[in-house]
Image: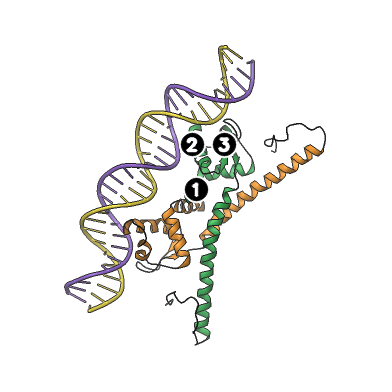
Chain colours: A green, B orange, C purple, D yellow
Amino acid sequence: MSEDRLSRVFAALADPTRRDLVARLASADATVGELAAPYDVSLQAVSKHLKVLEDAGLVSRESRRAPVRLEAEVFDLMTKWIDRYQQQAEERYQRLDALLAEMQGDTAPTRDTSSREEDAS
Amino acid sequence: MSEDRLSRVFAALADPTRRDLVARLASADATVGELAAPYDVSLQAVSKHLKVLEDAGLVSRESRRAPVRLEAEVFDLMTKWIDRYQQQAEERYQRLDALLAEMQGDTAPTRDTSSREEDAS
DNA sequence: ATTGTTCTCAACCGTTTGGTTGATAAAGAC
DNA sequence: GTCTTTATCAACCAAACGGTTGAGAACAAT
């Protein structure tokens, strides 16, 4: 289930350190050690963070000490989800605005396509 | 810090139930009770979920029993973050491709065309 | 004012998370 | 080979999470 995958992606990015790792990997691949250097947590902690990112599919490596690479395709998963509901919500607002405009400018509200919506009192 | 806000937004969306709530609110406002109905968890659990969404700024209400409304602007925060690094990563790939192309068309074949990474810095 | 209904608060419980330290595996360097 | 560096595994800990139940607050209705 890719639903579960979305959960993992969002959860992975909910941590500031992990978001920073992603941000840095966007400009250059880097080894675990290099990535860990700037933070004041242990290397093990960063290694764990990378595992979370890897399990979410946001990051990959060819071998143990190889540089970590950002997996940009996963971003599409998120944007697809976001865009869908953002668009849907915006359409609703537009419909609502149209309805209000109609009610105000004209006293013949006969056909309102958004009939299931309660009247915004 | 709006950095912290991003964390809250991503964390909020990391839960499938909360994503579903957002999905449903994208098509229509709804009260807590209405929102809770389809799930087999307690109303209190859903109320908690809504609080998480509210703290993240994803959702709002005018009063206690008023219908919950989706706050679409927050999506921009995410897409802005995502787009930035996605774009950055893509640019890197393009630069890398260009580099490889140059190296191949140019002098000695440096053999091993699949040695993609590093040295791009 | 009393009654219902709707929602939130509080306390609790098991699991997950982000961190630690210490030991161990794996890859390069000599 | 041996040694050193690099990264992971394992066990542990405190805090946060997602759920429960029970009590109480807030609002609508009579």
Q: Which amino acid does label 3 sit on?
A: Leu
Mark 3 nearby-residue class (10 Å; few <14, some 14–19, many ≥20): many
* Upstream in sequence: badge 2 or badge 1: 1
Frontmost residue, B50 versus A20: B50
Q: Do the residues labelled 3 and 1 touch (CB within 8 Å)?
A: no
- Residue bearing mark 1: A5
Q: Can residue A15 be seen in this view?
A: no
Q: In which quarter of the image is residue A66?
A: top right
Q: How many marks?
A: 3
Q: Which chain carries label 3?
A: A
Mark 1 nearby-residue class (10 Å; few <14, some 14–19, many ≥20): some
Frontmost residue, A43 versus A68: A68
Work out whether B69 lies above or below A80: below
Q: Which residue is drawn at 55% across and 60% down?
A: A83
Using the image, tell me which numbered label, if any, was put on residue B110. none
Task: Give the Cα distance between marks 2 and 1.
Answer: 18 Å
Q: Which chain carries label 1?
A: A
**Residue D2 falls left or right of residue B89:** left
Residue B25 at what x, y percent from top left? 45, 64
Residue A98 at what x, y percent from top left? 53, 77
Mark 2 or mark 1: which is in front?
1
Using the image, tell me which numbered label, if any, was put on residue A35. 3
Task: Give the Cα distance between marks 3 and 1.
Answer: 24 Å
Q: Mark 2 lies on which chain?
A: A
Work out whether B103 lies above or below B79: above
Q: Residue furthest right?
A: B107
**Residue B55 falls left or right of residue B76:** left
Task: Give the Cα distance between marks 2 and 3.
Answer: 12 Å
Q: What residue type is labelled 1?
A: Arg
